[in-house]
Image (spheres, coloured by chain):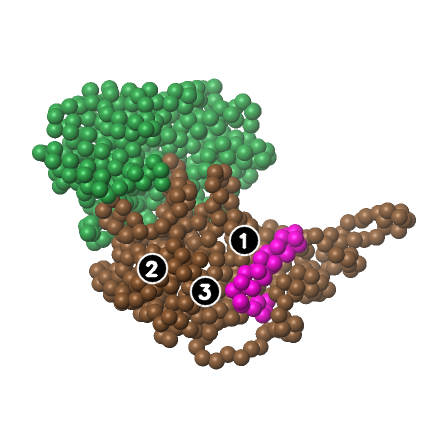
């Protein structure tokens, strides 16, 4: 497959792994931010190719995982209203709220519809004028432009029965928050290529300078990730801390201006509660005042912004990269995708789900 | 079709004016859709059977118009059943009718049997266009002719509008066992090789694309097809076929995990050797699906003794449905019930069953 298979060739992977081993003189800990990268690493066994002194830790870049439980509960409450139609991306369906999840709510009769694009939710609203149609707008900067476009469009059309429940989060504030945590052990970052395709990476340059940490904007294929690791280690070994763009086939420094414009028109930066990461200032997007009437929280009541109790689940620590999924005592025993204690085990992009799916052995050992 | 001047227990009637004589309006029914009366055992049902089913499935057993089919059997037989509930009913490459025949026939083949007779049970939703039913039934008949199986008995029920998704079909099948020894996961041994009959993922992706109206540039067609001929050829050639499994729901991953669990062995496969068409792979990539989990309707794996691999591969490649067969791995003692895959870049991972339903991801 063009643009894919050439990033999966074993010889090139081996060559990168050898190059990384050659230049590494000290232990380094790198965090890949995005859940898609985590899955690629675990699925292809990329970490198995690296020298022992280079460890990859997995970051908070799973939009489903960091959505606070209060939003899931709100979505459930809206879905259970008579006549309401809740539209959502597929992977929100099995994320547990306090007492249930959207998949179970649907089984009990709630009208919950999986859409592939927020614009489909608009179609649902047009076709069901007598129903309140709510789109659950979740995600990082990758989903924000399309979600913003749906809101913009609905406003222009005067679709009075459409609203959005917004839980949009931003990557750079989360990266900053991780770097500022006491005991932080992250030496370098692989930034999420798809996020940067939208936002560009100027903001990351400030972070790299201020925290003296190399950041490599990285793609999602095995060779992308290996090259990202190589560039990051090379900077660390040379005592450098700048932003490099490994994913130049998709990312430019200023990013996608048109996408940014629609985001800026519809959203404004707001503080956000992150599951597992706590309250982070200026880390999310909410609807700008001009679009407030399309906010599901205006129509159906505000989501309570509160700290949540994780119980036995270590997903907070997993999301911060402090615990590897297979180090959790509940991993694979009391916590599996079918009976999960936390969202990182249920989400398609959750780190625990990746380890369960691809590495599920006693003690989480990798197999050769 | 001639109008039937019968008023049923729940008539959907429309008054129409006779163009020639306005004084005498007649009550005429809508014959173009399925009504509850079609499942009532009365005249409407008889008419439907006569119009749609009998001509399509024409055979001496149905001609007897008996409560069941009577035939001779001897020796080991295989017996299987499956229900078909696909939405949409028609999708690129096949439809629910073709699936209902090929699916059950393939299940018999997986038992090492030669399919002979099928039953067909239909649950129709009130309001289903008769033309749709006719199309499905004709497609079943064509598939049955191709498979050389007879649909010898059947049933028909109609449920109220909204209580079913157009139509559901159940087929059961019996067939004569060809394999000299039982074929099944219990017979799989260490060092046995895993042969995959062709590329993966086309059926699942074709149906999902049709259901969700994904606007794909390339037309991906279901692989729905009979796999009877290569299986028969393997068995007739005396290949030590230890296990056969079709790769329907749950895909290759579920099939291998089930076999590994029952056999108490570890299966090891090489991802680089598993053929997935480029466009199928692209859609899977886009939606976050693993082709190993996606359903197929014309693919199977044969687990054969290591010494028969060459001969078995030659046989598979001679049949169009399995011409792109590949050897993809083998069984080892390892960890019982586990399937491992060496990744394209040389790493290793576990292959697990699909957890829950397949859901497209956010980004």
Separation of marks 2 and 3 at Cα, in angstroms = 16 Å
According to the rendering, which colour does chain A have? green
| Magenta stretch, residue numbers | B125-154
Q: Earlier in the sequence, mark 1 or mark 2?
A: 1
Query: x and y percent of residue A233 in the render?
Result: 16, 31
> What residue appears at the point 44 percent right and 49 percent down from the top-left corner?
B202
Q: Which residue is mark 3?
A: B228
Give whichever of B34, B130 is nearer the camera.
B130
In the picture, measured across the screen, residue B92 lies left or right of residue B23, that is left
Q: Position of residue A4 (x, y in %)?
A: 33, 38
Q: Secondary structure at mark 3?
A: helix
Quadrant of residue B301 in the image? bottom left
Say which colour chain B has: brown
**Residue under pointer 1:** B95
Are the residues under marks 3 and 1 on the same chain? yes
At 65% from the left edge and 65% from the top edge, which residue is drawn? B54
B60 w.r.t. A148: above or below: below
> Which of pointers 3 and 1 lies earlier in the amino acid sequence?
1
């Amino acid at each position: 497959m063009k643009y894919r298979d050439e990033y999966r060739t074993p010889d090139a992977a081996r060559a990168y792994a050898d190059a990384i081993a050659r230049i590494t003189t000290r232990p380094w800990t790198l965090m890949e931010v995005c859940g898609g990268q985590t899955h690629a690493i675990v699925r292809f066994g990329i970490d198995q190719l690296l020298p022992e002194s280079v460890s990859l830790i997995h970051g908070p870049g799973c939009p489903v995982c960091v959505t606070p439980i209060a939003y899931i509960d709100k979505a459930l409450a809206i879905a259970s209203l008579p006549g309401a139609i809740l539209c959502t991306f597929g992977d929100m369906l099995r994320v547990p709220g306090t007492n249930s999840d959207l998949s179970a709510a649907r089984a009990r009769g709630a009208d919950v519809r999986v859409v592939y694009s927020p614009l489909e939710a608009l179609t649902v609203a047009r076709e069901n004028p007598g129903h309140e149609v709510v789109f659950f707008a979740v995600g990082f900067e990758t989903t924000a432009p399309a979600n913003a476009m749906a809101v913009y469009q609905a406003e222009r059309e005067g679709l009075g029965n459409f609203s959005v429940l917004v839980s949009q989060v931003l990557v750079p504030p989360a990266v900053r928050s991780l770097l500022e945590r006491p005991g932080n052990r992250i030496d370098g970052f692989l930034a999420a290529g798809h996020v940067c395709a939208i936002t560009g990476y100027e903001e990351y340059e400030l972070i790299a300078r201020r925290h003296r940490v190399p950041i490599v904007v990285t793609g999602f294929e095995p060779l992308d990730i290996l090259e990202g690791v190589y560039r990051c280690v090379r900077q660390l070994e040379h005592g450098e801390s700048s932003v490099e763009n490994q994913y130049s086939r998709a990312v430019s420094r200023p990013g996608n201006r048109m996408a940014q414009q629609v985001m800026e028109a519809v959203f404004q930066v707001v503080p956000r509660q992150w599951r597992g990461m706590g309250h982070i200032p200026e880390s999310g997007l909410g609807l700008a005042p001009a679009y407030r009437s399309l906010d599901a929280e205006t129509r159906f009541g505000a989501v309570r912004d509160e700290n949540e109790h994780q119980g036995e689940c270590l997903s907070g620590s997993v999301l911060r990269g402090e615990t590897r999924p297979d180090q959790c005592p509940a991993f694979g025993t009391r916590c599996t995708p079918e009976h999960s204690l936390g969202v990182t085990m249920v989400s398609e992009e959750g780190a625990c789900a990746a380890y369960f799916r691809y590495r599920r052995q006693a003690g989480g050992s990798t197999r050769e | 079709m001639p109008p039937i001047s019968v008023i049923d227990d729940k008539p959907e009637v429309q008054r129409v004016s006779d163009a020639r004589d306005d004084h005498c309006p007649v009550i005429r029914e809508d014959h173009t859709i399925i009504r509850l009366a079609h499942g009532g055992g009365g005249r409407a049902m008889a008419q439907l059977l006569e119009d749609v089913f009998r001509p399509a499935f024409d055979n001496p057993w149905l001609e007897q118009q008996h409560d069941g089919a009577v035939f001779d059997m001897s020796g080991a037989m295989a017996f299987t059943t499956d229900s078909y509930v696909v939405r949409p009913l028609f999708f690129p490459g096949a439809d629910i009718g073709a699936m209902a025949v090929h699916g059950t026939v393939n299940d018999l083949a997986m038992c090492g049997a030669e399919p002979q007779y099928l039953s067909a049970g239909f649950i129709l939703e009130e309001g289903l266009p008769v033309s749709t039913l006719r199309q499905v039934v004709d497609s079943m008949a064509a598939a049955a002719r191709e498979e050389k199986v007879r649909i010898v008995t059947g049933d028909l029920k109609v449920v109220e509008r909204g209580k079913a998704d157009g139509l559901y079909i159940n087929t059961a099948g019996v067939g004569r066992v060809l394999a000299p020894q039982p074929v099944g996961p219990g017979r799989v041994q260490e060092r046995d090789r895993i042969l995959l009959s062709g590329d993966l993922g086309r059926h699942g992706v074709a149906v999902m694309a049709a259901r969700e109206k994904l606007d794909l540039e390339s037309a991906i067609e279901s692989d729905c097809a009979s796999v009877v001929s290569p299986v028969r050829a393997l068995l007739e050639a005396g290949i030590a076929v230890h296990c056969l499994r079709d790769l329907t729901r749950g895909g290759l991953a579920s099939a291998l995990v089930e076999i590994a669990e029952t056999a108490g062995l570890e299966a090891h496969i090489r991802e680089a050797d598993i053929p997935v068409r480029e466009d199928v792979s692209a859609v899977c990539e886009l939606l976050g699906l693993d082709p190993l989990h996606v359903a197929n309707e014309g693919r199977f794996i044969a687990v054969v003794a290591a010494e028969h691999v060459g001969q078995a591969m030659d046989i598979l490649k001679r049949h169009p449905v399995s011409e792109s067969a590949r050897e993809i791995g083998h069984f080892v003692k390892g960890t019982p019930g586990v399937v491992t895959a060496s990744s394209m870049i040389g790493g290793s991972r576990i292959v697990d069953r699909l957890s829950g339903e397949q859901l497209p991801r956010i980004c």
